[in-house]
């Protein structure tokens, strides 16, 4: 009877531990660039520059280093931050957004959440 209880507990523990493993989801920042007429702007340069969320300069190096992308035909620039976030890690990254095309420049801020696609719009 005791060995049957131990076996049941062992099987239950194995099922719980298998169910707790999960795949890490993507952490994405998507910036849409629009002109003053609300038309999507392709070919714009978008730069994300990390800001400390704690008021200190001890921000992860990958966040502090600017990332640059060019908007596609839909006026969207996508940034992947999977290398920054690890499973079980909690946190938010805040980025300054600088979008430009020719002499037109637009600025904004985006707060990127772990394992989510966060979207923001910037007007130039």
Image (spheres, rainbow, N blue to C red):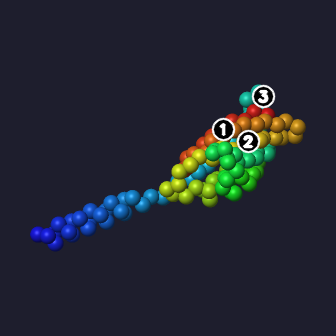
* Residue of label 2: 97
Q: Position of residue 99 (x, y in %)?
A: 78, 41
In primary-sequence order, the first of circles 1 and 3 is 3
Instruction: Please report the residue visible at 62 percent of the width from the left and 56 percent of the height from the top.
Output: 84
| Mark number displayed over residue 90 | none
Nearer to us: label 2 or label 1: 2
Marks 2 and 1, how far apart in space?
Answer: 9 Å
Looking at the image, do the residues carrying marks 2 and 1 touch, with CB atoms under 8 Å apart? yes
Q: Earlier in the sequence, mark 3 or mark 2?
A: 3
Q: Quadrant of the C terminus?
A: top right
Q: Nearer the N terminus, badge 2 or badge 1?
A: 2
Residue beneath the point at 72% across and 42% down:
96
Compared with residue 117, is residue 87 higher up or lower down, i.e. above or below?
A: below
Q: Residues within 10 Å of mark 3 (few under 14, many from 20)?
A: few
To which residue does mark 1 refer?
A: 120
Q: CA distance from mark 3 to mark 2?
A: 17 Å
In the depicted view, which residue is nearer to us: 95 or 57? Answer: 57
Residue 39 visible to an observer of this rendering: yes
The quarter holding residue 117 reads top right
């Amino acid at each position: 009877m005791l060995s049957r209880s131990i076996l049941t507990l062992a099987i239950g523990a194995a099922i719980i531990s298998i169910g707790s493993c999960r795949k890490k989801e993507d952490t994405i920042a998507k910036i849409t660039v629009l002109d003053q007429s609300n038309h999507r702007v392709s070919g714009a340069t978008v730069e994300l520059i990390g800001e400390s969320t704690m008021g200190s300069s001890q921000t992860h190096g990958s966040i502090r280093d600017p990332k640059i992308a060019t908007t596609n035909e839909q006026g969207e620039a996508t940034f992947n931050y999977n290398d920054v976030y690890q499973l079980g890690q909690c946190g938010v990254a805040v980025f300054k957004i600088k979008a430009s095309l020719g002499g037109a420049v637009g600025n904004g801020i985006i707060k990127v959440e772990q394992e989510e696609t966060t979207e923001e719009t910037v007007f130039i």
